[in-house]
Amino acid sequence: ALFDAIDKNYFASQFHIELFVSTFFGPHHEEYIKEKIVRTGWPMEYLDRHIEPSKVKDDIILFPHRNAPEKQLDIFLDLKKELPQYEFINCNDYKLTKPEYNKLLQQSKMVFSANLQETLGISCYEILMAGGVPLVPNRLSYVEMYDDMFKYPTAITESFKDYEDHKEMLLGKIRTLMDNFDAPEVQQAIKNNKEKLETQYFTGTNLYKELI
């Protein structure tokens, strides 16, 4: 009802648009629906004032997501057992203030995701802003947002069983990014992906244009 009543409906990612339309209208929706949808990104330009990039990193991998079934914390905890050479931190284990969390981002090399639900995802952008790398499954909004270097095949973490069956592939991907973090191609990918998200997804530019 709200969608029909509102002239323009704003979405942050193409994935979110497709999810919404397929759920509520199905594949044979009316053409007018497209005219009511605008992909704008999300107005978060203020993050630049709070997260500074840092090249001085520790071997830290973060889980900054909420403890919910669709975030698959169990996979992260198993990775911690498999890769003792790195420090795995579940941010939910600490009562971090926002400045403390931002400092932890600056210290960390990676944010890991095995999410089964995501229509935008802020923490993976935040690690890019802090000069680190996201590691995400090739599904959901991640498909359109992240460089191939930072994605792993979606089948690896569709479930914990799938993870167990494909664990070695994911372990290898993590080792490669962590141990080659300072390589020019990795650092360039961080820079490029950060700029892409900054200008296309974490900005209200398109929203402001629509409102003028």
Image: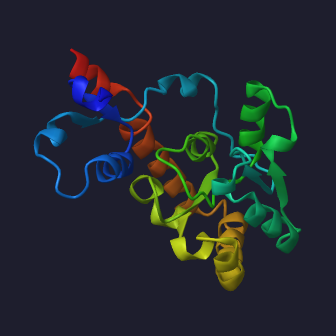
Depth order, front residue of 108/101: 101
Count of marks, rendered view:
0
Residue at screen point 72% across, 33% down: 102
Residue 36 left/right relative to 13: left
Q: Position of residue 42 (x, y in %)?
A: 42, 31
Q: Residue at x 82, y 31 (%)?
A: 96
Q: Position of residue 65 (x, y in %)?
A: 68, 46
Q: Tell which of 134 and 183 is nearer to you.
A: 134
Residue 7, percent from left and from top: 20, 24
> As rendered, which of 54 and 36 lies closer to the eye?
36
Q: Is residue 75 above or below residue 117?
A: below
**Residue furthest toward the front?**
1
Is residue 46 in view? yes
Q: Which residue is the extreme one toward the left?
A: 31
Quarter of the figure with the N terminus: top left
Q: Quadrant of residue 134?
A: bottom right
Q: Residue at position x 72%, y 72% from top?
A: 175
Residue 160: name its quadrant.
bottom right
